[in-house]
Image (cartoon, rainbow, N blue to C red):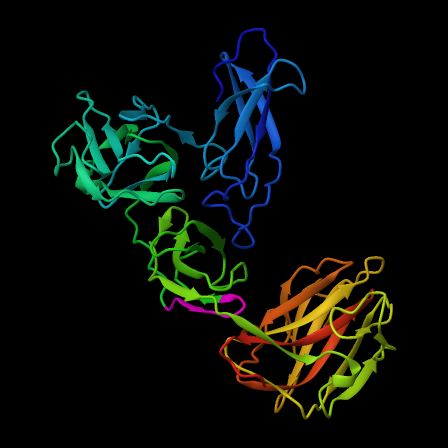
């Protein structure tokens, strides 16, 4: 809400989104990283009334805060008059932010007509984001009961710098250390410890000593049983981190959190299922994860923490030029797509040759089976192949298929549309990895062996499959931890 609008003056206001991290509760396809400019804010709107201008816009993924600029003519916005904080909001479209102050300062309301009754077993909550460059020394929530005495009940975190009430009583109850900086954190206070069970709240204060914070959703969790913490949380490292946990009865989703130091989780993602493949990881980096079950405002709290260190990795090339195909391999082409070796258009990724498909509007592939020079796959390995999609004739689907000795069928991973019919989608017989790779350049396709059930198997066949279009393929094999031995 902007209340510095002069009567009769036309103001033009824009929002900019500098580089930063996404809002805590943004549900994104994966964890975000990298110094990439975020998208320009969209769906901006302004409404006028009561001497104020209300501004809103859609959140931009990868944004830490927004700068608002104002001018009095279209396209000219010389005055930066507000910075909105870590995102448009933790939830919905707006959050409230304090000023930077070295002493006691607060935002509050009272005499609310829409009061909040507190029952036995209720828990009060509020979300806060502490400015990492200007952290407060004390964070305090004050609850104002709807009575003639206007009596305050308080809970605080950090140093005991709140002057009101008596420490250790419901008028000033210590909850613990300050929450982590630079991330959205849910503060919770049992109503019983601040003495408001059976009362009705007509006001609430968001109080700091020093620094700056941004506040968002606040209210109560009613006295229903809290969701259990997810059990069986595991993380398996490789080229990507495979995370799994057991389902929780009553949960509508799960919030997976990640950080790069113990106990501090700076990224999160909302998930409907109990498995996630985190492929936005860096070699040599250690990642820390927790997960909690969620149903509306009912959060279980964090699970046990697991951590993985992404190992140094080594490529073992199994297929490259025609002269060094695996011994014993029987070469096959289907739907008129033979093994065709090229030395240009495009230039091979490695060696002297690459193999190229025909141009077809339907399924076409070339493959081999029966290799006696096999490729053993170990736990933690990933499988890879290099591909170049024809920019003038991109396929709708790209698929890699592997055959393991002793198996009854091939296992498959694909990118793009689900146009190929073998196997069952979402299983190792047809696992979707993601969108099509970029066309017009060499791209490395990579799949953790675990998701196609090839760990501890010996591979003797490999298929290069397309639906529509044309592609060129080059070296393929497996990536293993640096300590592993070649096959």
Front-lying residue, 144 or 411: 411
Nearer the observer, 448 or 143: 448
The quarter of the picture where residue 370 lies is bottom right
For the view shown, which residue lies furthest in the top direction? 8
Q: Above or below — where is 465 with respect to 75? A: below
Q: Position of residue 90 (x, y in %)?
A: 45, 39
In the rendered structure, which segment of residues is drawn in magenta?
232-241
Q: Is residue 434 visible?
A: yes
- Please state, as top left, top right, bottom left or bottom right, where the C terminus lies in the image: bottom right
Q: Residue 410 placed where, x, y %? A: 66, 82
Relative vertical location of residue 298 with respect to residue 310 in this rendering, above or below: above
Q: Main secondary structure of the magenta part?
A: loop
Residue 414, picture quadrant: bottom right
The answer to which of 221 and 236 lies nearer the viewer is 236
The residue that appears at 48% across and 42% down in the rendered structure is 23
Give x and y (percent) for residue 366: 79, 79
Q: How far across and how far down the image is residue 421, in percent? A: 72, 73
Is 460 part of what is drawn in magenta? no
Identify which residue is drawn at 47% across, 64% down. Answer: 284
Query: Which residue lies most toward the front here?
Result: 351
Residue at position x 62%, y 13% in the image: 72
In the image, taking residue 249 as reference, residue 84 lies left or right, namely right
Query: Residue drawn 18% across and 41% down?
Result: 193
Count of residue discs = 0
Q: Is residue 449 at all visible to an observer of this figure?
A: no
- Is residue 196 found left or right of 44 in the rendered image? left
Would you say 427 lies left or right of 222 here?
right
């Amino acid at each position: 809400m902007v209340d510095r609008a002069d009567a009769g003056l036309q103001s033009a206001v824009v929002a900019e989104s500098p580089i930063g991290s996404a809002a805590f509760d943004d549900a994104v396809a994966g964890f975000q990283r990298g110094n990439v400019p975020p998208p320009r804010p969209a769906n901006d709107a302004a409404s006028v009334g009561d001497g104020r201008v209300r501004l809103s816009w859609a959140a931009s993924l990868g944004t830490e805060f927004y700068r608002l600029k104002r001018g009095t003519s279209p396209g000219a916005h010389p005055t930066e008059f507000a910075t909105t904080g870590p995102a448009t909001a933790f939830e919905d479209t707006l959050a409230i932010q304090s000023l930077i102050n070295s002493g006691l300062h607060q935002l509050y309301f009272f005499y609310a007509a829409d009061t909040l009754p507190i029952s036995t077993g209720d828990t009060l909550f509020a979300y806060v984001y502490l400015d990492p460059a200007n952290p407060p020394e004390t964070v305090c929530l004050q609850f104002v009961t709807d009575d003639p005495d206007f009596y305050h009940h308080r809970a605080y975190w950090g140093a005991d710098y709140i002057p009101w009430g008596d420490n250790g009583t419901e008028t000033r109850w210590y909850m613990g250390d300050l929450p982590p900086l630079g991330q959205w954190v849910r503060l919770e206070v049992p109503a019983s410890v601040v003495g408001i069970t059976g009362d009705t709240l007509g006001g609430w204060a968001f109080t700091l000593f020093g620094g700056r914070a941004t506040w968002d959703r606040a209210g109560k969790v009613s006295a229903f049983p809290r969701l259990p913490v997810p059990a069986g949380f595991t993380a398996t490292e490789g080229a990507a981190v495979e995370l799994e946990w057991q389902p929780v009865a009553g949960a509508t989703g799960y919030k997976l959190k990640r950080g790069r130091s113990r106990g501090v989780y700076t990224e999160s993602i909302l998930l409907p299922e109990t498995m996630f493949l985190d492929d936005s990881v860096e070699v040599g980096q250690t990642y820390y994860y927790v997960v909690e079950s969620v149903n509306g405002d009912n959060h279980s709290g964090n699970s046990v923490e697991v951590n993985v260190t992404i190992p140094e990795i080594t490529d073992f090339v199994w297929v490259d030029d025609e002269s060094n195909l695996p011994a014993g391999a029987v070469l096959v082409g289907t739907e008129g797509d033979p093994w065709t070796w090229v030395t240009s258009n495009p230039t091979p990724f490695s060696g002297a040759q690459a193999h190229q498909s025909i141009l077809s509007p339907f399924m076409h592939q070339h493959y081999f089976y029966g290799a006696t020079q096999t490729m053993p796959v170990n736990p933690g390995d990933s499988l890879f192949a290099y591909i170049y999609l024809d920019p003038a004739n991109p396929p709708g689907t790209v698929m890699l298929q592997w055959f393991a000795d002793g198996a009854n069928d091939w296992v498959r991973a694909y990118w793009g549309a689900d146009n190929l019919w073998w196997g069952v989608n979402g299983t190792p017989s047809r696992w979707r990895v993601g969108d099509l790779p970029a066309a017009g350049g060499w791209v490395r396709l990579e799949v953790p062996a675990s998701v196609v059930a090839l760990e501890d198997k010996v591979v003797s066949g490999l298929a290069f499959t397309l639906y529509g279009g044309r592609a060129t393929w080059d070296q393929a094999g497996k990536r293993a931890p640096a300590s592993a031995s070649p096959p």
